[in-house]
Amino acid sequence: IGIGAEDAKLVTSDPASINGQAFHGLFVGNREITVNLHIYGKTRAEMYENRQKLIALLSSRQSAAGQLGTLEYTNDYTTVWIPAVVKRGPQVTDRVGNYNKSVQVVFYCPDPFWRSVNQTINRIAYMGGGLTFPLTIDAETGVSFGAQGFEGTIYNGGDVPAPILITITGPSTEPSVIKVSTGEYIKLRYPLYEGQTLIIDTQPGNRSVIITPGEAGEPVPAFGYIDLHSTFFQLDPGDNTLRYLTGDASTTATIQLAAYSRFGGV
């Protein structure tokens, strides 16, 4: 119970002097999944032993530290997973012979969307070549046609937007990644040097920007260097074209994209 599409909550307000309400959108809250199962043993003692093992494994006290576990679901079509904790440990009711035939466990999932088992991973490749113009440019004033860049596509096979993990290995003067379809971008107002790695996670509620200064250095939080107009965008269902700009003439940076496809229900 609770694996399908969750009910959306209406976001409305009651402005003065109008009839009805103003509609602002839909909001999907958390998810609760109820699992019904039975416990069996070849003997009654083995049944009680198995019951004790299950209670120890799925006790809600195991989640007291605030750590999320992984709940996996499989049917004849797919396998997906979701971050979860045990809200209500095994509740045992009827026993018939060596069976506890009605056992219930409730899982709490703060993020309601299911994930694909495997990440989709792709790289943004350098766009070589250039343009030729029958044009003479004044040596003093000059003209700028834009920085060299990279472009690639990543696929979200789900039915809801999916966060993305972007990993950029320098050098780059001001690295930025643009979602071509919307113009949204994430830009770092800080140089990324040779061997440094920038990791950007757009997961709502757990967004992060980290620079790792090579093998020997410790990761450094870099949220303060993000351009104020940046958007921690997500991937739309289907193909998403992303463009990377270096801010200089470098073509040696490497850019990796990774995402789990997201599903509103299974």
Image (cartoon, rainbow, N blue to C red):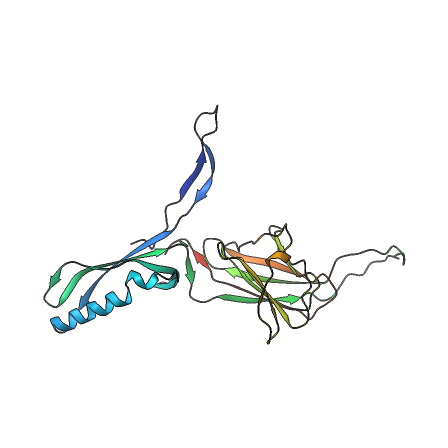
Residue 2 % position (x, y): 32, 53
Observer able to see residue 76: no
Observer able to see residue 46: yes
Q: Nearer the viewer, residue 126 or 44?
A: 44
Q: Is residue 32 left or right of residue 197?
A: left
Residue 69 % position (x, y): 37, 64
Q: Residue furthest bottom?
A: 216
Quarter of the image where the C terminus is located? bottom left
Residue 21 % position (x, y): 44, 31
Eyeballing the image, is 32 above or below 196?
above
Can you tell which quarter of the image residue 220 is in?
bottom right
Can you tell which quarter of the image residue 198 is in?
bottom right
Residue drawn at x 57%, y 68% is 219
Q: Which residue lies furthest to the top in this view?
A: 17
Q: Nearer the viewer, residue 153 or 133?
A: 153
Can you tell which quarter of the image residue 232 is in?
bottom right
Residue drawn at x 82%, y 58% is 133
Q: In this view, does 47 lie to the left or right of 74?
A: left
Q: Which of 223 and 1 is in front in this view?
A: 223
Q: Which of 265 and 50 is in front in this view?
A: 50
Residue 160 % position (x, y): 46, 53
Quarter of the image where the N terminus is located? bottom left
Eyeballing the image, is 23 above or below 29?
above
